[in-house]
Image: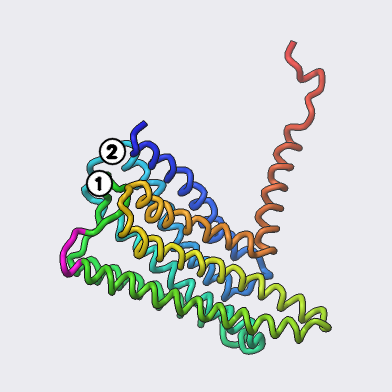
Amino acid sequence: MSSDIIVGFILLYISTLGVIANWTVFLFLSKVPSIHKSFGSLTRNQALGDAIQTTTVLFVVVPMVLFDIEFLKINSNIVSFVMLFGYEVSVLSHLLLACNRLCAVTNPLKYQQLYSQRFTIGMLFTANMYAFASIIVLYTSGCRYFWSSELHMFMYHVSNSCVNFSFYGIFCKYLTIIILILLIDLFSIYKARLFLQKTQQDRISHQVNTKEVGLLVQTCLQGLLFTVELICYFIISPHVENKWAQFFLTTFAFLTIHTCDGTISIFCNGDFRKYIFKNSFTKLSGQLSKVGPRTESHIPQ
């Protein structure tokens, strides 16, 4: 079995899970009334960024690899920019979510006042426009990323301008953002612990803060995963010679982490998790009840 077939089926399996998880979050999270609108909007925007990447892999990269479509390989630089836009949206959404959780666990009263829907929409519009502008700047710089059939990963054409842009414009920028996210998350964990200790005797306040901590766990896990991805992609993989090791440190790690992003959003939101599985069970039960048990009169003679 050729390496393209193996890689294609690995990407097919993971991207399918990613598409299901991320589009589920994007389409249905807003239907859960108990989730604060601001947090829900930020999480949905993050899921949109992840969905753009996993959907592009499923419907473009997977066919390109499995069926060796030359046209897609020649134009894979366009595919890479679409995925980079999704990545930019996802990372910036993580940063906004980290700030959101910090405010929620440190000062719940101001959180309700500050994070209005209008303010949240303004933040998301600014972040997404910045993401789009960043990709336009990268494209106009002449830097191109193409799919390498040998290494099964997107690689830029080696030139001084492209190497510098990739290092400073991508790696250093994302490293700075993710370090900032981790610092905010660590401080949020510290403040959340203090608040939980203060509200031990107040059952209602304790339940509210416990829920906020659960959502904080979501942002912390996702921030940690992004850190792992960045280290694998930019720091470890350049020092590895084996092509399979490079594949698992780059393309596989990239896709898996953005698939896990949507899964974490589902399982760290108790109310959303109940909504998803309860509705799925209800629909399945309804379909089965319509079929009903077969009587003797229904059995063909």
Q: What percent of the width, then of the height, locates residue 237?
A: 35, 58
Neighbour tally class for label 2: few under 14, some 14-19, many 20 plus, Cα within 10 Å: some
The quadrant of the picture occupied by the C terminus is: top right
> Which image quadrant for residue 113?
bottom right
Q: Residue 252 colored magenta?
A: no
Task: Name which residue type carries label 2.
Answer: Asp
The quadrant of the picture occupied by the N terminus is: top left
Residue at horizontal 65 percent and vertical 55 percent from the top: 276
Please give the range of residues in magenta. Answer: 157-162
Q: What percent of the width, then of the height, locates residue 223?
A: 51, 69
Residue 142 as seen in the image, left or right of residue 126: left
Residue at horizontal 67 percent and vertical 48 percent from the top: 280
Q: What percent of the width, then of the height, locates residue 277?
A: 68, 52
Q: Which of the pair 95/35 is nearer the observer?
A: 95
Kind of element beneath mark 2:
loop
Residue 265 as seen in the image, left or right of residue 196: left
Task: Name which residue type carries label 1.
Answer: Lys
Q: Which residue is mark 2?
A: 68
> Label 2 to label 1, Cα distance in Å?
8 Å
Asked if the residue under mark 1 is in contact with the one under mark 2, i.e. CB atoms within 8 Å, the reply is yes
Kind of element beneath mark 1:
helix
Q: Which residue is mark 1?
A: 73
Q: Earlier in the sequence, mark 2 or mark 1?
A: 2
Q: Residue 159 colored magenta?
A: yes
